[in-house]
Amino acid sequence: MEQKSSSVALVLFVCVCLCSFSWRTSEAQHTWQEAFKVLGISWNPNGTLNREIQIPMVDPTPYEDSTTPAPTALSQDIYLSPKSKAYIRLYIPLNPPKNKKLPLVIYLHGGDFVLFSASTVIFHNFCNDIASQFPAVVASVEYRLAPENRLPAAYDDALNAIFWARDQALGKGGRDPWMEYADFSKVFLLGSSAGANIVYHTALRALDFDIRPLQIKGLLLNQAYFGGLKNTQSEIRLKDDPYVALYVNHVLWSLALPPYLNRDHEFCNPISGGTYLGRVNRLPKVYIKGDFGDPLVDRSIQLAQFLYNNGVTIYYRFNAGGFHGIELQNTTAAQELYDDMKYFINNPFGTSHEGISDQPLYNDMKDIVNAEKTHASS
Ligand SMILES: *[C@@H]1O[C@H](CO)[C@@H](O)[C@H](O)[C@H]1NC(C)=O
Ligand SMILES: *[C@@H]1O[C@H](CO)[C@@H](O)[C@H](O)[C@H]1NC(C)=O
């Protein structure tokens, strides 16, 4: 816990210092060099990225170990092929129930497509929490990062993780003993920030494949990282945000997208058009969470509206205040998110829950937009 907060504090400290430096120079014209400083990245001579700000990475904890603070869940790394670096960090609760199988949650971490790993301590702790609290079997996907591997590489890796889970369900090549706890008919894809973008695109891609006996029952999108050529109101209002400033996002998208695509490509702006549009109505139910203090909130509202218009069942929560990544720093906000997600996973559609809405969406959406206006003018 201390390691977690001190590492986050370090990153925030560096970000805040660098951001305040860049604010002083020029309000309007930020350079990509400034964005690189904020992100703690620089180019290597061979064209790869040097990632200087490192949140610690931690090893999995496959056994209960008296020497460390007791983990709330067990974890192990499963390499997907001898040649690739791709792996799944698999979690089970410490004492899985004997009489009942658990939902399988496939998790995609955040980091703007460019940073971090499934082993990064903040995401490792997040997965421990959800495995023990839901409870669930959690498969956290180590996916390839940009710009060394631009999109759709991360989508491909996430899809491979789904194929791995399908093969586990079929028992191909032997099933990992921990996967005996998983209910393959209750699979959920969960992602935060860039991970939520990956979840959305991977779910649409998976519709083209025979993944039986897996059944993807829902998607959970926490503060999804999307963009577009035309800035939204929240992006403009919060353009100098310390976590996801507008100019930094623009640089990040230029690293994540293939060089010939712009921010209105569906990878970045999924409601703008593209090849996936016609499949959206085949998605399972979706949980969408946003915060009005996060510049990306309008993108989530737009997506929620778009999914709703396409007949997708959605649950959502948009909180006043907050900021991008709040659940990684504020344990109260984290617990609210866990409670929402647990509710979404364990309850069939048709019931409602304090704070999360499922019906009627249209009126609530107007309320959301009004709430945002109030927030913006206060
Ligand atoms: C590129 O350069 C970096 C830093 O010198 C090095 O760590 C990395 O292995 C190199 N990568 C390739 C693919 O050559
Ligand atoms: C943490 O989040 C909760 C709920 O979202 C909020 O009420 C509280 O003020 C936050 N605490 C801090 C220190 O920001």
Image: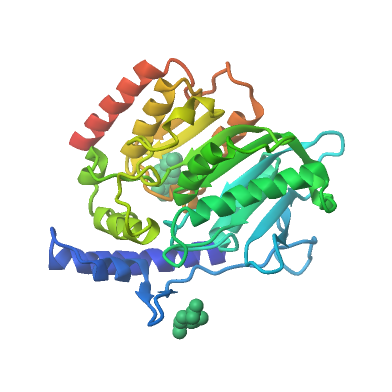
Name the residue located 26 percent from the left edge and 41 percent from the top edge.
Answer: 234
Question: Residue 166 is drawn in which quadrant?
Answer: top right
**Quarter of the picture holding the N terminus:** bottom right
Residue appearing at x 18%, y 35% in the figure: 377
Percent from the top left, x then y, of residue 314?
A: 49, 25
Colour setup of the view: rainbow
**Picture residue at 67% right of the left edge, 57% below the top:** 89
Numbered-mark total: 0
Give the image quadrant in which the ligand numbered 2 is located. top left
Q: Quadrant of residue 40?
A: bottom left
Q: Seen in the image, is 36 located left or right of residue 129? A: left
**Visible residue check, residue 254:** yes
Task: Examine the rendered structure and indicate whether residue 68 appears above or below residue 178.
Answer: below
Residue 335 visible? The answer is no
Q: Which residue is located at x 80 percent, y 42 percent?
A: 170
Image location (x, y in percent) of residue 270: 38, 39
- Asked if residue 323 lies left or right of residue 164, the reply is left
Locate the C terminus by quadrant: top left
The answer to which of 52 and 48 lies nearer the viewer is 48
Query: Where is residue 179 drawn, in percent x and y?
Result: 79, 47
Q: Nearer the viewer, residue 10 or 302?
A: 302
Depth check, front residue: 260 or 339: 260
x and y percentages locating residue 156 in the rendered image: 55, 52
